[in-house]
Image (cartoon, grey):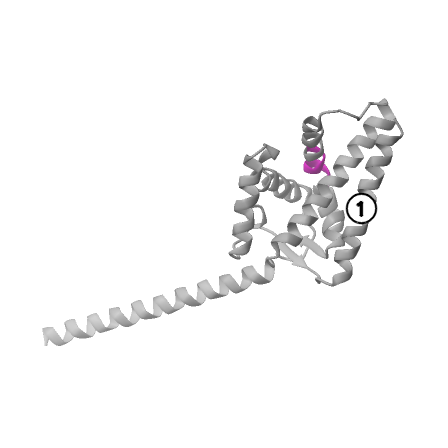
């Protein structure tokens, strides 16, 4: 009788463990499915959106130097300017995300950022997210280290894992229509044309 009870107890334990395993598998699957919905993984689209935004901040800063202080931009070191552009991004990008749920580069490529409730990010949420991008994604813009961080971020995205700065937000891609690519290229060319025009006026 004791052996029978022991057998029944062991059988119940095995069954309970089996249910627990299935439950964990279902939770894991649901989590993965939710991640793919909230964080579509398009590494290059996301990267080029970021490059565009940084270019906008760069051109804004250089234009300010040229037309306000008449600084000679020819032969000027770009290292300090690049850090100032990153600093501008840290404080201005949260405003873009708070009011428009996007940034210039993201808007062109059909990307939108919001919280899990479908609402605009607060300025603080946007600031924390942008700071996370600068630290973990861009490596503080430190030469060589920035390439390492970019490579790691690319691999995370390729493996369909959430970037550290996106853990509390939804990353939405409206569409990937071809016209967005042509629009991106055209506007990027225009930005470089403006930059060279600024330099040539000196």
Q: Position of residue 128 (x, y in %)?
A: 61, 41
Residue at (59%, 57%) from the top-left corner? 41
Q: Quadrant of the C terminus?
A: top right
Q: Quadrant of residue 196?
A: top right
Badge 1 element: helix
Camera-side residue of 76 and 21: 76
Seen in the picture, residue 7 relative to 37 is either above or below; the reply is: below
Q: Is 118 within the magenta?
A: no
Residue at (70%, 36%) from the top-left corner? 91
Camera-side residue of 153 and 166: 153
Disc 1: which residue = 189
Say left or right for 82 vs 187. left
Say left or right for 119 vs 156. right
Can I make out residue 129 in this image? yes
Q: Position of residue 121 (x, y in %)?
A: 67, 48
For the record, the magenta segment spans: 87-92
Seen in the picture, residue 71 relative to 95 is either above or below; the reply is: above
Say left or right for 67 vs 32. right
Residue at (63%, 53%) from the top-left corner? 44
Say left or right for 105 vs 194. left
Q: Position of residue 43 (x, y in %)?
A: 61, 53
Task: Decide whether the magenta segment is chiefly helix, strand or loop.
Answer: helix
Camera-side residue of 143 and 22: 143
Can I make out residue 102 in this image? no
Q: Quadrant of the N terminus?
A: bottom left
Residue at (26%, 70%) from the top-left corner? 14
Camera-side residue of 1 and 12: 12
How many residues crowd mark 1 within 10 Å: few (<14), some (14–19), many (20+)? few
């Amino acid at each position: 009788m004791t052996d029978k009870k022991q057998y029944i107890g062991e059988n119940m334990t095995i069954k309970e463990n089996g249910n627990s395993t299935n439950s964990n598998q279902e939770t894991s699957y649901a989590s993965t499915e939710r991640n793919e919905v909230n964080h579509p993984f398009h590494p290059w689209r996301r990267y080029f959106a970021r490059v565009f935004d940084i270019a906008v901040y760069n051109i804004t800063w250089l234009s300010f130097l040229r037309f306000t202080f008449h600084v000679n931009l020819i032969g000027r070191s770009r290292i300090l300017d690049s850090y100032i552009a990153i600093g501008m991004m840290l404080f201005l990008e949260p405003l873009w995300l708070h009011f428009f749920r996007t940034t210039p580069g993201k808007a062109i490529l059909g990307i939108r950022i919001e919280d899990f409730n479908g609402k605009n990010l607060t300025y603080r949420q946007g600031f924390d997210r942008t700071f996370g991008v600068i630290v973990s994604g861009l490596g503080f813009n430190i030469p060589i280290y920035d390439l390492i961080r970019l490579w790691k971020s690319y691999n995370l995205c390729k493996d369909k894992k959430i970037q550290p700065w996106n853990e509390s937000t939804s990353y939405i891609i409206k569409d990937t229509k071809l016209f967005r690519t042509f629009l991106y290229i055209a506007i990027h060319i225009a930005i470089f044309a403006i930059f060279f025009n600024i330099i040539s006026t000196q």
